[in-house]
Image (tube, rainbow, N blue to C red):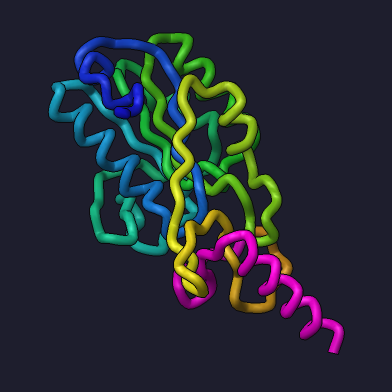
Amino acid sequence: MALFSEDHTLETFRRGRVEVICGSMFSGKTEELIRRLKRANFAKQKVEIFKPSMDVRYSDNEVVSHDKSMINSTPVDSSSSILLLASDVDVVGIDEAQFFDKGLVEVCNELANGGIRVIVAGLDMDYQGKPFGPIPHLCAIADEVSKVHAICVKCGQLALFSHRTVLCDKQVLLGETERYEPLCRKCFLKALDKQSQLKET
């Protein structure tokens, strides 16, 4: 069954709404965000894409997925900057939303209430499996939530956790496969238990 966001009327008519794409690392969140934004571009809509300025893993001024799909974006330091820069647009895309402040929820609501389609992508849980940043609140107010999954590198089941493979207690630690791996619930709990034992020794 097609997602509601796949209805072509969403690309051809101005309709305020909030769409959230969430899941673990390596699950295709950014790839799906880019796909939807490119469809909006093809439908002749005016699109603006934003990402947190701290995220420079692949590019300073582009949103880039793990499979190297990319689209131009504007780096911003706070959610309030998005409101200032998103005037006279039809669609707003926001990547790595977990790194933004909690004001992002109200920003997305305000944009959607003004008739703008807002598409947000981000991690719903941090490396400990706890709710991450504004994403859980965005899921609550969203018109549509798409939870995507990676594949567990240990057993091949669907993965929903982003396990940090290096010892660091900071919630925010930028990295890719050298620092994180996608795990299913069972393998994630095993990995946490193993790390806990290492810390005690």
Measured as percent of width and height from the top left, residue 77 is found at 52, 43
The front one of 118 and 161 is 161
Rendered residue at 42%/54% (across/down): 27
Rendered residue at 29%/11% (across/down): 14
Measured as percent of width and height from the top left, residue 119 is found at 40, 30
Measured as percent of width and height from the top left, residue 125 is found at 62, 50
Rendered residue at 27%/26% (across/down): 6
Q: Is 189 a magenta residue? A: yes
Measured as percent of width and height from the top left, residue 200 is found at 86, 84
| Residue positioned most to the bottom | 201
| Residue positioned most to the right | 200
The front one of 90 and 121 is 121
The image quadrant where one finds the C terminus is: bottom right
User: In the rendered image of this protein, does residue 91 appear above or below residue 49?
Assistant: above
Q: Is 101 a magenta residue? A: no
First to last magenta residue range: 172-201
The front one of 28 and 85 is 28
User: In the rendered image of this protein, does residue 116 appear above or below residue 77?
Assistant: above
Q: Quadrant of residue 35?
A: top left
User: In the rendered image of this protein, does residue 13 appear above or below residue 107?
Assistant: above
The image quadrant where one finds the N terminus is: top left
Rendered residue at 51%/64% (across/down): 182
How many marks do you count on the picture? Answer: 0
